[in-house]
Image: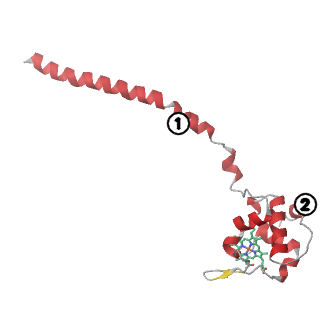
Amino acid sequence: MTHAVNRYRAIPAAVLAVVLTAVLTAVLTLAPTPASAATDVPTTALSRGWVFDARDGAALYVAACQGCHMADGRGAQGAGRYPALLGNPRLVAAPYVVRMVLHGNRAMPALGRMMDDAQVAAVATFVQRRWGGLDVPAITPAEVAAQRQP
Ligand code: HEC
């Protein structure tokens, strides 16, 4: 009788040992994978924030402005009011366009942290020429840098 009981206990113990060994092996084999994957994540991405990739003014307009000012530059009116850039007489003032892109105003978001000086210059020049219809010289990155402080 005692023998029979011991044998029943012995079987689960053996099974448990096998299962434990399998689990431990799995953990030890798998453990290095997530650890090394974690070290591959560039930690600088956390502090750099989100930035636009495009360098070209037209491409930056599509990525950063078109959602509100529309593909035809006519803006939109609905849930919000997005002014038309097409034919907008204010575009003649380069510093004004640069300031809007860098610092925004009311419902216009400040995009200065998401673009470097050359990108702001490129998209502002694009807006002046394309929507303002203006034959203006390209805005320089130095002009943008000078307006970084509001
Ligand atoms: C989230 C929507 C939104 C995005 C994105 C946006 N704008 Fe605007 N923009 C606005 C709104 C709203 C105004 C009006 C702000 C105000 O009331 O002063 C405005 C105003 C402007 C003005 C001034 C127009 C005027 O008549 O005074 C310029 C210039 C301008 N935006 C350029 C741009 C450019 C260039 C980009 C992309 C780099 C851009 N905007 C991205 C919403 C947006």
Element carrying mark 1: helix
Residue plotted at (80% across, 60% down): 119
Would you call the spot at circle 2 few (<14 residues within 10 Å), some (14-19), or many (20 or more)? Answer: few
Query: Is the N terminus in the top left, top right, bottom left or bottom right quadrant?
Result: top left
The correct choice, above or below, for 79 with respect to 8 in the image is below
Q: Nearer the viewer, residue 16 or 134?
A: 134
Query: Is the C terminus in the top left, top right, bottom left or bottom right quadrant?
Result: bottom right
Q: Which amino acid type corresponds to the residue marked 1 in the rendered image?
A: Pro
> Are discs 1 and 2 less than 8 Å apart at CB?
no
Element carrying mark 2: helix
- Find the distance from the CA under tag 1 to the CA under tag 2: 45 Å
Of marks 1 and 2, which one's residue comes earlier in the chain? 1
The reply to whether the residue tagged 2 has its Cβ within 8 angstroms of ligand 1 is no
Residue plotted at (57% across, 37% down): 37
The correct choice, above or below, for 59 with respect to 73 in the image is above
Would you call the spot at circle 1 few (<14 residues within 10 Å), some (14-19), or many (20 or more)? Answer: few
Residue plotted at (75% across, 60% down): 113
Q: Which mark is residue 142?
A: 2
Q: Position of residue 44 (x, y in %)?
A: 69, 45
Q: From this viewpoint, is residue 65 visible? A: yes
Q: Nearer the viewer, residue 1 or 126?
A: 126
Q: Position of residue 27 (x, y in %)?
A: 44, 30
Q: Which mark is residue 34?
A: 1
> Ligand 1, what quadrant?
bottom right
Residue 50 relative to residue 118: left or right: left
Residue 15 relative to residue 6: left or right: right
Figure colour scheme: secondary structure
In this view, which residue lies farthest toward the top? 3
The reply to whether the residue tagged 1 has its Cβ within 8 angstroms of ligand 1 is no
* Image quadrant where residue 140 sits: bottom right
Q: Position of residue 107 (x, y in %)?
A: 69, 75
Q: Which amino acid type corresponds to the residue marked 2 in the rendered image?
A: Ala
